[in-house]
Image: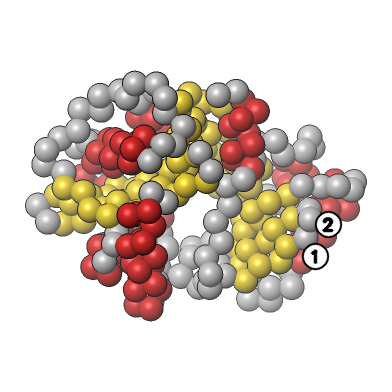
């Protein structure tokens, strides 16, 4: 598992919900998320084939066509072209989040994460569990709750994908109360771990570790060879490193004003 392998797996990792609006060329991908997302407009991909300044200017021009959005979330990712970060700062971009990019060779023996028996885990294969997952993540990530039709659609999808080995979202419960959630998506041989979230008042009780252990077990059972995750430097990052993940770099998101 080389740095090039990890960078390629990161570049291939994009997620666009069916209800989103996209602007895509061979150089860029802009996504306008549904209204319940806290950051509705995001640049997911940038692969310049011309001078960087020209492509950056095009991103801003296309982003400004969304009249109801005042900010663009712009990610500087592994493999981004030299000079991009400086260009984003020159646009007025302010760092919102820095994530470690971590990967794990799933052919290596699993590390014992000392999972506590008090944590109950369920996949989001029904509407009730999907609603619990969204509730936790809306609190942690400061999003709004999706409408019921979105919850129903997500639960139907997960009922098929979890069984087929394509992943879903796990919800953690303490005494019947949803307190954590974390997803897994599959890309070729890669287990993409996303959305790990635990309510602040119950952190430190092994909930994130339980969600991580269960997802890694699922990945190994379905023949995946790499675990890939982008972890918050101060929270999930240390847990992931103790679980055997290695850091391959960092990615930063910038909030760029459009008006």
- Residue 73 marker: none
Q: Which residue is mark 1?
A: 61
Q: Picture quarter containing residue 218?
A: top left
- Looking at the image, which is closer to me, 180 or 8? 8
Left or right placement of residue 256 versus residue 242 in this view: right
Element carrying mark 2: helix
Category of crowding for the residue at label 1, using alpha-carbon neighbours closer than 10 angstroms: few (below 14), some (14–19), many (at least 20): few
Say whether marks 2 and 1 touch (CB < 8 Å): yes
Q: Residue at x 47, y 47 (%)?
A: 186
Q: Picture quarter containing residue 132?
A: bottom left
Q: How is the image coloured?
A: secondary structure
- Residue 24 in percent (x, y) is at 73, 62
Q: Is residue 244 visible?
A: yes
Left or right placement of residue 34 versus residue 156 in this view: right
Q: Residue at x 64, y 53 (%)?
A: 44
User: As displayed, is residue 213 above or below residue 23?
Assistant: above
- Looking at the image, which is closer to me, 204 or 239? 239
Element carrying mark 1: helix
Q: Picture quarter containing residue 69?
A: bottom right
- Residue 57 marker: 2
């Amino acid at each position: 598992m080389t740095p090039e392998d990890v960078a390629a797996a990161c570049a291939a990792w994009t997620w666009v919900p069916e209800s989103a609006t996209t602007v895509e060329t061979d150089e860029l991908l802009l996504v306008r998320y549904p209204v319940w997302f806290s950051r509705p407009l995001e640049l997911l991909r940038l692969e310049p084939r011309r001078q960087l300044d020209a492509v950056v200017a095009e991103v801003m021009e296309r982003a400004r066509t969304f009249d109801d959005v005042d900010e663009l979330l712009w990610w500087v990712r592994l493999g981004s072209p030299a000079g991009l970060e400086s260009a984003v700062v020159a646009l007025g971009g302010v760092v919102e989040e820095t994530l470690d990019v971590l990967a794990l060779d799933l052919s290596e023996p699993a590390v014992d994460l000392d999972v506590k028996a008090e944590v109950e885990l369920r996949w989001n294969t029904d509407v009730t569990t999907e609603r619990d997952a969204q509730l936790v993540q809306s609190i942690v990530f400061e999003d709004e709750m999706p409408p019921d039709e979105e919850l129903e659609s997500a639960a139907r999808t997960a009922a098929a994908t979890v069984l087929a080995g394509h992943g879903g979202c796990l919800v953690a419960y303490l005494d019947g109360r949803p307190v954590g959630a974390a997803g897994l998506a599959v890309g070729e041989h890669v287990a993409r771990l996303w959305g790990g979230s635990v309510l602040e008042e119950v952190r430190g009780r092994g909930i994130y570790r339980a969600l991580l252990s269960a997802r890694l077990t699922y990945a190994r059972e379905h023949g995946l060879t790499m675990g890939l995750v982008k972890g918050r430097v101060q929270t999930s990052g240390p847990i992931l490193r103790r679980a055997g993940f290695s850091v391959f770099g960092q990615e930063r998101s910038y909030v760029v004003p459009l008006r």
